[in-house]
Image: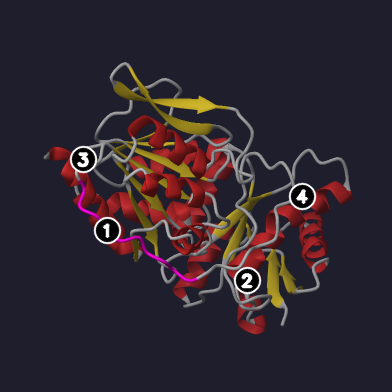
Amino acid sequence: MSVRVLVVDDSVVIRRLVTQALGADPTIEVVGVAANGRLALGKVEQLAPDLVTMDIEMPELDGISTVRALRAAGHRMPIIMFSTLTERGAAATLEALAAGATDYVAKPSGVGGLQEGLRRVAEELVPKVHALVPGRRRTERLASVPTTATAVATPPAATTRGPVRLRPATPRTTPVRAVVLGSSTGGPAALAELVAGLTEAPPVPVAIVQHMPAVFTRQLADRLDRIGPATVVEASDGETLLPGHVYVAPGGRHLLVAAERGGLRARLTDTPPVNYSRPSVDVLFRSAVAALGGELLAVVLTGMGADGAAGSGQVADAGGTVLVQDEATSVVWGMPGATAAAGHAHAVLPLKEIASAMRKAMGEARR
């Protein structure tokens, strides 16, 4: 059965581009288009699409207001926002995600022609459509890779997830000295809930990789900083990683944890993408193991692909603890599912329980 999509955009050119890019996939059917949010509300009631693509700036009713109206009316279908890679576009996209949108893709800019535009939209959008509407094309929920600031090739096809195999919990003999965390699709909303759940500033530094372009990660850090007791910043190369602080990897650069001069420092690199991602969760996790061994807590939240699974294995093998978000509360159970299926997770938890588990593990650092 095809995935039924409604395309909402005030630009005729973009509507045509998205419709053609999606229509090239035989498992996707564009069932309708709308030029603004007010028309989209009626189309959703009429057509009952499986997924909606949504422009942000539109006449009569903008995309953010439309998302709020759809969620208030009880519609739970995934909504993918079409965003521009600007400060204003990033701020609006994060507001849309906070309002209930599911994910976003960047509008093509600076393309050489129609075919290049079609290719870019298809590469960004089609894998997300299939990941966010599971069961139409396949029963498993893993799908290609997340949108990143640097994409180097067409992602590989999804691989089927195996059964969850938890690692047995072992008593910790050393304190947790840092937390490393990875997320992708659905991550901004999950991170907001997690940061809000930290009822006091963490006693150790927390480093985060969220798959987003550079301008988006800066806006994300600013938003998270206003939510909870921790100080949240976009990481800078060479800065000391301090307790009570959360460091978000800049889009387009890998974030590493380095042990230098008796402390921990952030290091940013422009080395090639890993798992088609830069920043990469695996790069962060591996660097933290090299710096701290098993004195780590690693957390893998919702996201497409498998970034973080291999790095989680290194954390667990070194004696660290690995927590992953469960399938029921994940937007896409790709990254956490891959980690759990590989047998690297010590616990699979609903999102609302992860902050508490983190607080408990970090509390050991005070002993």
Q: What element carries label 1?
A: loop
Q: How many marks?
A: 4
| Quarter assignment of residue 326 | bottom left
Label for residue 51? 2
In this view, 215 is above or below 321: above
Residue at 52% x, 71% y: name it.
70
Residue 310: percent from left, percent from top: 50, 49
**Which residue reaches farthest left?**
367
Indicate left or right for 224 with 7 as reference: left
Which-is-in-front pick, marks 1 and 2?
1
The location of residue 250, given as percent across then percent down, is: 50, 34
For the residue marked with disc 1, what is the amino acid? Ala
Let me know if residue 343 is in the magenta part: no
Q: How far apart are marks 3 and 4 (CA)?
A: 47 Å
Query: According to the image, label 1 marks what residue?
Result: 169
Q: What element carries label 2?
A: strand
Q: How far apart are marks 1 and 2 (CA)?
A: 40 Å
Label 2 Cα crowd, 10 Å radius (few <14 / some 14-19 / many 20+): many
The image quarter containing residue 277 is: top right
Q: Could you tell which of marks 3 and 4 lies nearer the N-terminus?
A: 4
Q: Which of 188 and 68 is in front in this view?
A: 188
Magenta stretch in the rendered image: 163-172
